[in-house]
Image: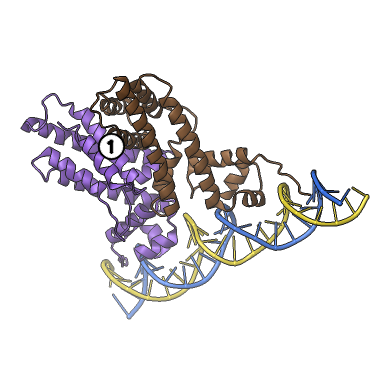
Chain colours: A brown, B purple, C blue, D yellow
Amino acid sequence: MVRLREFDENEALDAAMRLFWEKGYEATSLTDLTTRMGIQKPSLYSAFGDKKRLFEAALRRYTQHHAARVRALLQSRDSVKQAFRLLFESVAAPRDDGGTERGCFCINTMVELAPHDPAFEVLTREHQMYLTALFRETIERGVRSGELRSDTDAQSVAETLVVSLIGLTVLMKSRPDRTFVDRSVRVVLGLLA
Amino acid sequence: MVRLREFDENEALDAAMRLFWEKGYEATSLTDLTTRMGIQKPSLYSAFGDKKRLFEAALRRYTQHHAARVRALLQSRDSVKQAFRLLFESVAAPRDDGGTERGCFCINTMVELAPHDPAFEVLTREHQMYLTALFRETIERGVRSGELRSDTDAQSVAETLVVSLIGLTVLMKSRPDRTFVDRSVRVVLGLLA
DNA sequence: AATAAAACGTACCGATCGGTATGAAAAGGA
DNA sequence: TCCTTTTCATACCGATCGGTACGTTTTATT
């Protein structure tokens, strides 16, 4: 029995993720979605449920990929300071391109949906907590290696770096001066000593 | 000649501001607006133009009030450290209320509209620059009074505090633990020394 | 009191919203 | 090959979207 899917669910979800990431939940219509996903509405509904459920699936996909990327980036350098500098500069990069400027999907969702939907409040909080754990572990590695001062409060510094990274990501959306961004990154990374 | 307005433009704009602040641009409908503003659609259009123009007027009103509030708060204490602590704690406050949790209208707009609308990119950037100037002047006051170290880089620290305050405001939307918030505020304010 | 100008309430506009009913097409099991 | 089951495409649903035409009511001026 059965007729099998003619589209790849992962590819379709990926397309939905990029669209929600770029435009947000409310500003993205089902027409936008079906066009970019390359499927029709009934296929979308049978595979992913309604718009909110599709959005949630897209966000979960994003947070998993994002967490993996941050983890890989932090582990890509022996120097903890270098690793964090790499991470912050990947956010502070100019992006004066023609490409799409999207920031962080999870942060966008924190602003648009978390205050009005407990499910997204939890989902976004858990991602920030996970990033904080990654940061703390990396800082602890730096303490063990002797790169960072032995009296470093890894947890507190990790939390502060997460807050700063969120702030920097949001601020970038207003395209501030490079000097502004560079100086604040320098000060923030100065917390690692 | 002429028949005069039966509603107060400032009151109506104030109601629109609170609504956009709470729900964002896309999620706020004209029906929501006319209901809360207490006027009909033709009155809204003749007084404020279309939805985007009304939103822009509401945001300008917000940034003016917000800037005045921050300025007053920073000037309310002789101690610069105390003043910034007051400001950051007003953002980090629990708000475990039944009231509306809204965060900062300007930050919400940075996330929702600035990346897709140059007018709001400029408007939100200018507000952040103004806040940065307020912070810098306050820090310089602390340096002059001897409360802060004389080698303090007022501009860089001001920029970093703005970034941190944005990050904290956004993070609050996911209702993180008090301990997380308190520790990161403590570390950030540690930049004032 | 007559008039002209502006704001009011109502009722409506086409377009689009998120979501679905329906029937044809496709494919594994018998 | 026939049947059953799922997916596909089309066409459609009521509701709501942002925005406006229009006729009435109000008011300052003459």
Residue sticking out furthest to the left: B145
Image position of B74 (left or right of A129):
left
The percent coordinates of residue A135 (x first, y second) are: 36, 32
Residue at 49%, 40% (x, y): give it.
Answer: A21
The percent coordinates of residue B161 (x first, y second) are: 24, 35
Image position of B146 (left or right of B171):
left
The percent coordinates of residue B64 (x first, y second) are: 25, 47
Of residue A32 and residue B13, the one placed in the foreground of this image is A32
Name the amino acid, label 1. Answer: Ser
The percent coordinates of residue B29 (x first, y second) are: 44, 58
Local packing at callout 1 (Cα closer than 10 Å; few below 14, some 14-19, many 20+) is many
Residue picked out by circle 1:
B164
Quadrant that contains the C terminus of chain A: top left
Of residue B112 and residue B64, the one placed in the foreground of this image is B112
> Up-down: is B124 above or below A186?
below
Chain to which the residue tagged by mark 1 belongs: B
Q: Across the whole image, how many numbered discs are drawn on residues?
A: 1
